[in-house]
């Protein structure tokens, strides 16, 4: 697993719960180092062990931990750059959904050896969609649910999201857009200039 993913899990636990909780999770996962290096590669089994240790320590399911990780990646102040990058996907939430097909390629432009899952959006109606997540690592779909939930909030859209499980190696997420302009979303400007 790419170190950037493991480092994201580490930062999520540390920033959301505390450095002490991270140390407890790291100890339970039998890590023999202080933290992950973002540009190294680690054995996939280590990531699985880490997620299982986090789920036990936090008294949550692994799926919930992964969804919370996805929300963290978009909503935490330390990761404003990622939120901004995702907001360039479109002016509204539906535009953003349609930009997800290109996410894997854009990720590889930034980090060539980062193996993000391939995402495929299917429109059923103007407000009902299915997003299929193809990847070799189980659980990425739950991270995507967290990202979608946070981005819907960011755009001010009211959506229902349901992870429908895994079939033939693909995870399916059902998206029902109830209101694209339910409330005022977070402020977003193309430039980062402060007034």
Image: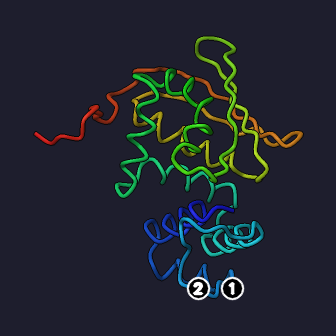
- Per the image, label 2 sits on a secondary structure element best described as loop
Residue 121 x, y percent position in the rendering: 67, 25
- Are circles 1 and 2 on residues that touch, CB within 8 Å? no
* 173 horizontally vs 185: left or right: right
Residue 24 x, y percent position in the rendering: 57, 83
Residue 150 x, y percent position in the rendering: 47, 42
Q: Residue 33 bears which disc, if any?
A: 2
Measure the C-alpha gap from mark 1 to mark 2.
Answer: 9 Å
Above or below residue 50? Residue 81 is: above
Residue mark closest to the camera, 1 vs 2: 2
The quadrant in which the C terminus is found is top left
Above or below residue 164? Residue 110 is: below
In the rendered image, the residue lying farthest to the top is: 125
- Per the image, label 1 sits on a secondary structure element best described as loop
Q: Which residue is drawn at 53% across and 62% down?
A: 8
In the rendered image, the residue lying farthest to the left is: 195
Residue carrying label 1: 30
Q: Which residue is drawn at 54% across and 29% down?
A: 159
In the rendered image, the residue lying farthest to the right is: 168
């Amino acid at each position: 697993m790419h170190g950037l993913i493991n480092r994201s899990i580490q930062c999520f636990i540390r920033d959301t719960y505390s450095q002490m909780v991270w140390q407890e999770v790291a100890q339970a996962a039998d890590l023999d180092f202080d933290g992950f290096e973002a540009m190294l590669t680690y054995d996939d089994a280590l990531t699985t062990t880490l997620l299982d240790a986090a789920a036990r320590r936090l008294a949550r399911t692994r799926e919930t931990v992964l969804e919370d990780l996805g929300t963290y990646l978009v909503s935490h102040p330390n990761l404003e750059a990622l939120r901004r990058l995702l907001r360039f996907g479109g002016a509204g939430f539906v535009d953003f959904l349609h930009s997800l097909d290109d996410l894997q390629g854009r990720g590889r432009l930034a980090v060539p050896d980062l193996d993000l899952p391939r995402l495929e959006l299917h429109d059923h109606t103007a407000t009902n969609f299915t997003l299929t997540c193809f990847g070799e690592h189980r659980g990425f779909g739950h991270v995507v649910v967290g990202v979608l939930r946070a981005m819907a909030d960011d755009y001010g859209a009211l959506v229902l999201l349901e992870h429908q499980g895994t079939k033939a190696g693909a995870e399916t997420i059902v998206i029902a857009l109830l209101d694209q302009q339910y409330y005022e979303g977070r402020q977003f400007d193309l430039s980062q200039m402060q007034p």
